[in-house]
Amino acid sequence: MVHALDEIRRTLKPDGILIDLRPMQDHWSVEVASMKEVKAAGLLTDMPIGIADDEASFRAMRDVESHGWFVKERAEEFAFFYYWDMPSEMKEYMEKEWEDFEKLEDDVYRAAQSLWSSANADARVRVRMKMLIARWSKSKVK
Amino acid sequence: MTLQKDPEGFEKKILHKYADFTDKRILEVGCGEGRLTWRYADASNLTVGLDPDQDSLRVAHADSPSDLRGRVLFTQASAKNIPFAKETFDIAILAWSL
């Protein structure tokens, strides 16, 4: 990761900026949302590989900062939602795409099914992800 | 399966709050199928999407709006060896890729 960040730095102009945009593991919540209301079904379980990936990412940015390659200007967290029409679609997607990163526990899935089946017809199931965005400026020194 | 990602557009809003893409040269690392690319590329002077996965890049190419085809390039490459000269870009985006 650090080598890639050094390579990105090489291709940036002297006053260039780097935007780091990525999801962070943090027990993302499963919700049933309709126009009328949003109800929480429970939390996903963070898996070790995803946690390790996050730690490696933060470590890489700390390294490039300590090397003086980039200077952090600002950062914040925000929500990013994945929506599915029904809980079974969410489960299928997670088992296929997020297997290494997030686990949908049976009790959370059952809660989502229950909330969805009793909700308004427009209700969908969603996952609220925690996102990070950070802006870094290319340092003049190396 | 019907999957929608960020229909509220929170990601686009915050991305534009963090950088002004107008007439800039942009490098997007980990562009994948170009989902994020189309949220800012129309403002740029040049956008280069980088990804090691050729299948994803094929989708990105296929989805390219015709009016952006001259300004948006997709390249199969790793961030460890970026096939561009030094000091080419104004902004680099790590798109869910760090």
Image (spheres, coloured by chain):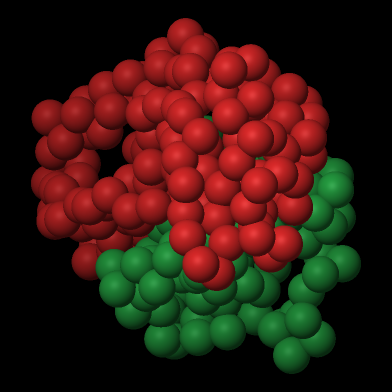
Find residue B55 and report its horizontal and vertical position in percent: 85, 45
The front one of A112 and A53 is A112
Q: Quadrant of the C terminus of chain A?
A: top left
In this rendering, the answer to whether B56 lies above or below A66 is below
The front one of A138 and A119 is A119
**Left-right relation of B47 to B74:** left
Q: Colour of chain B?
A: green
Q: Residue at x 47, y 9 (%)?
A: A48
In the picture as drawn, the residue positioned furthest to the bottom comes out as B67
The front one of A65 and B16 is B16
The front one of B78 and B18 is B18
In the picture as drawn, the residue positioned furthest to the front comes out as A118
Find residue A140 and report its horizontal and vertical position in percent: 14, 53
Q: Residue at x 70, y 84 (%)?
A: B68
Q: Residue at x 23, y 66 (%)?
A: A15
**Left-right relation of B53 to B9:** right
Q: Residue at x 28, y 28 (%)?
A: A58
Find residue A78 and report its horizontal and vertical position in percent: 33, 53
Quadrant of res A130:
top left
In the picture as drawn, the residue positioned furthest to the top comes out as A48
Q: Colour of chain A?
A: red
Q: Quadrant of the N terminus of chain A?
A: top left
**Left-right relation of A87 to B91:** right
Tell me, yes or no, if residue A19 can be seen here.
yes
Tell me, yes or no, if residue A93 can be seen here.
no
In this rendering, the answer to whether B88 lies above or below B17 is above
Quadrant of res A92:
top right
